[in-house]
Amino acid sequence: MPIGGGEAALIRRYFHALTAQRDGVELGVGDDAALLDADTGDRLAACCDTLVADVHFPADIPPEALGHRVLAVNLSDLAAVGARPAWTLLSVTLPEKDPAWLERFSEGFKTLADRYGVALVGGDTTHGPVAVSVTALGWVSDSMGLRRSGARPGDGIWVTGTLGDAARGLELWQGRTGETVSGDPAYLVGRLFRPEPRLAVGQALLGTATAAIDISDGLAADLARVLEESGVGATLSLPALPRSPAFMAEGGTLRHALHGGDDYELCLTVPPSREAEMARLSERLVTPLTRIGTVEETPGLRGEDADGAVSALDPEGYDHFAERA
């Protein structure tokens, strides 16, 4: 069914109501710019991600899952600096107006936005190949926030959740044999489609963690960025990498856990003096926190296997501009 009235009608119908998620939005969706009543005493955190069909998500992803995913990956960036989310801007590019698709997409976006009190305050719609861009804004109470550059020798390396699920889920989704799938068919595909931003962990570890990053391009690649910016190295305990039962049952490998992207867990470094707090935090937030290695003075990333053998790890991960075979 066509949508009458063009772009303005599309915005009113599917996105205008998403402004109401929080107070302080004096002017939101529908005007040329948003007017926001900003808190005082905090630092503003801002991030932006563009997701393109068949690059960042399968083109046949359920629309409600895509709505969740595009917001979740930005909230994960805010989690990595310890921010409290507040507002988002959303730009959607579509080849045609599709009321059913937009209804499901906006509902997936809204469900996650409601959970975290995030208001949509502006954006754009345009015609073209499917792509979605989200800008997220939030507040950091600590004047420094969490950064990539603070890891120190002796710090423990911790991760939230489990690793490799989304990478294995993508393979399973792409390997379907033509059967009809409605929604998220399995745990691993659900982890790909609906990542869970670890906002509560990031906020709780302000003043405790020395460095943090969200795992978007793979553990090895993202941890290597922390090590480089901090001027240190690290050794990982490979048997300690947390892997879900579904991952193990569905053929997940060490390669997925080290180099697979899209889990959007947090990787953090924590001083030895604060490690006793991690178990209590994990229990309080009902979020698994696992120590997987140690920061060291010697540059580079290494892995220790179950037999105690240590070898260099390739910090490979997803690179948008790497040459494709």
Image: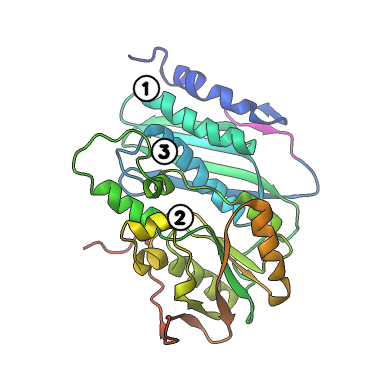
Question: What residue is shown at x 53% (from left), y 80% (from top)?
Answer: 233
The quadrant the C terminus occupies is: bottom left
User: Would you say residue 32 sits in the magenta stretch?
Assistant: yes
Sequence-earlier tag: 1 or 3: 3
Label 1 or label 2, whichever lies nearer to me, is 2
Q: Do the residues labelled 1 and 2 touch (CB within 8 Å)?
A: no
Q: In this view, does 146 lie to the left or right of 90?
A: right
Residue under pointer 3: 66
Q: Quadrant of the N terminus?
A: top left
| Residue with the mark numbered 2 | 263
The Cα–Cα distance between marks 1 and 2, rounded to whole angstroms, is: 28 Å
Q: Which residues fall within the magenta stretch?
A: 29-38
Residue 167 location, x and y as percent?
36, 56
Residue at image coords 34%, 14% = 2
Q: Can residue 228 be found in the magenta stretch?
A: no
Q: How far apart are marks 3 and 2 (CA)?
A: 15 Å
